[in-house]
Image: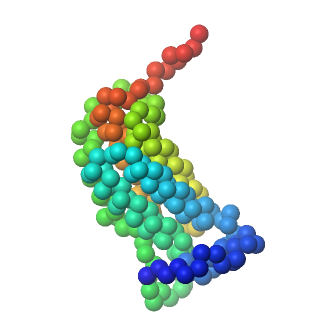
Amino acid sequence: MVFLNRIYTRGGDKGETSLGDGSRVSKQHPRILAYGGTDELNSVLGLVRSVEVPEKIDGWLSIIQNDLFDIGADLCVPEPAADQPAPEHPPLRVTQDQVDRLESWIDEINEQLEPLTSFVLPGGSPASSWLHLARTVSRRVEVSVWSLHDAEPINENVLRYLNRLSDLLFVLAQFCNDGGRASVLWVPGKNRE
């Protein structure tokens, strides 16, 4: 259970912060950038939900927002070293079931879309526009988590989840543009002289 009775602690005033295991790291540490990015992505999804989206999609986004807090919790507790004893209270870790759920939603939405003949220019309806922004933030967060992965062991389900999430956000953006019929496709070289 989380209990917050003070919002500021002054503990980060010198450029360090605490991880979930109590260790201190620089606020520029790849782990902080990775789970900070998930918080940014969660905020963008909050903006998506503030515009008109179909009820089913709003429900999915609510689930995803909670999952993103799970990802933050997963990333804020480093994997224990092989020679360390198992913790008394195992940290929260993202599961393959969460990844599988995203895949099933992608398949469900994608079945309703026409195949694409070119790349899509972000925009269209407000919901589609915000979903495209969320998709690009999701890709950036995934890259930051890969940077962390290159430096330290992490739960690879986090990487899978973020990869699927950006795919889901893309098909949802298409869906919110009249099933893709209102999307504008990229025309290579269209404006060259």
Q: Residue at x 42, y 39 (%)?
A: 126
Q: Residue at x 69, y 73 (%)?
A: 12
Q: Residue 96: x percent and y percent?
A: 34, 64
Quadrant including the C terminus: top right
Residue 101 visible: yes
In the rendered view, does 33 fall on the left or right side of 90? right
Q: In the orientation shown, which residue stands out farthest toward the right?
A: 14
Single out the residue that lies furthest toward the top.
193
Quarter of the image holding residue 26?
Answer: bottom right
Give the mark count.
0
Query: Does residue 24 lie above or below 185 as drawn?
Result: below
Q: Which scheme is used to colour this image of the protein?
A: rainbow
Q: Is 9 on the left-hand or right-hand side of 71? A: right
Q: Is residue 167 visible?
A: no
Q: x%, y% of residue 137? A: 52, 49
Residue 189 appears left or right of 10: left
Q: Looking at the picture, how far across and down is residue 119, in whole percent?
A: 43, 30
Side of 68 relative to 176 (left or right)? right
Q: Position of residue 57 (x, y in %)?
A: 31, 50
The residue sitting at 36% across, 67% down in the picture is 95
Q: Quadrant of the N terminus?
A: bottom left
Going 41% across and 60% down the picture, which residue do you hit? 65
Residue 142 versus residue 158 in the image, above or below: above
Hey, which quadrant is residue 192 in on the image?
Answer: top right
